[in-house]
Image (cartoon, grey):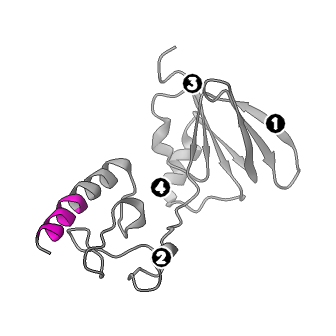
Amino acid sequence: MNNFDYDLVIIGAGPAGLTAGVKKVFLLHRRDQLRAAKILQERAFASSKIEILWNTVATGVEGLFGIEGVHVRNVKTEEEKTLKANGCFIWVGTLPNAEFLGDDIITDEYGFILTDARMETNIPGVYAAGDIRDTPLRQVSTAVGDGAIATLAAEHYIENL
C-alpha cells in the first residue's frame, strides 16, 4: 500500500483538489448544498472519487496508530455509521483567536489581525504571523514565511530600542 492508496474523509465543504491519487474521498457536509464556487462544485459532482454525504457531521475518529475510520451521523435521519478511511482533513472554516490581545490591536471585520509587509501590527513591537493574520492564503508554508519575516523584523526592532 502506497501513500495514495487509501480512502480519505474531508469534514466540511473542503478542497476537491485533494482527490488526486486517492481511491475515494468522502466529503461530509452538514447542509444539503455546497457554497463553494460553481466550478469547484461541478468538479466534485463529476468526480467518481468523491462521495458527498449531505447533512452529515463527524462524531468521532477511531484508530490505534492512525486513523482507521470516522464515525458520522446524518443530522436529518440521525443514522450513524463508520466510514473506513486512513486519513481525515477537517476543513470547516477558520475563526481567528485574537481576543487575548485586547481591543487595541487592529483587526478586519472578521477578527483577523492587520499587519504590514514586515508582519508588524499597529502596536510597535507586536507582530502577527500565520492564520491569525489577514491573508488570502492559509497554509503552513505561508505561515512559516510569515514567521520568518516577523522574526527578522522583531529582531531589528529589539536591536534598535
Task: Please identify the residue farthest to the left as the structure is shown.
Answer: 160
Foreground disc of the pair 3, 2: 2
Q: CA distance from mark 1 to mark 3?
A: 19 Å
- Left or right? Give the position of 114 relative to 2: left
Q: Where residue 63 sits in the image (x, y, percent)?
A: 68, 27
Residue type highlighted by circle 4:
Ile
Q: CA distance from mark 2 to mark 4?
A: 29 Å
Q: Are marks 1 and 4 in contact (CB under 8 Å)?
A: no
Residue lying at 20% horizontally and 68% vertically, measured from the top left:
118
- Residue range (magenta): 150-159
Identify the residue position indicated by label 3 in the image: 6
Query: Does the segment drawn in magenta span residue 153?
Result: yes
| Chain-order first, disc 3 or disc 2 | 3
Q: Which mark is residue 111?
A: 2
Circle number at residue 81: 1
Which residue in the structure is indicated by mark 4? 39
- Amino acid tagged 1: Lys
Whole-angstrom CA distance, mark 1 to mark 4, is 30 Å
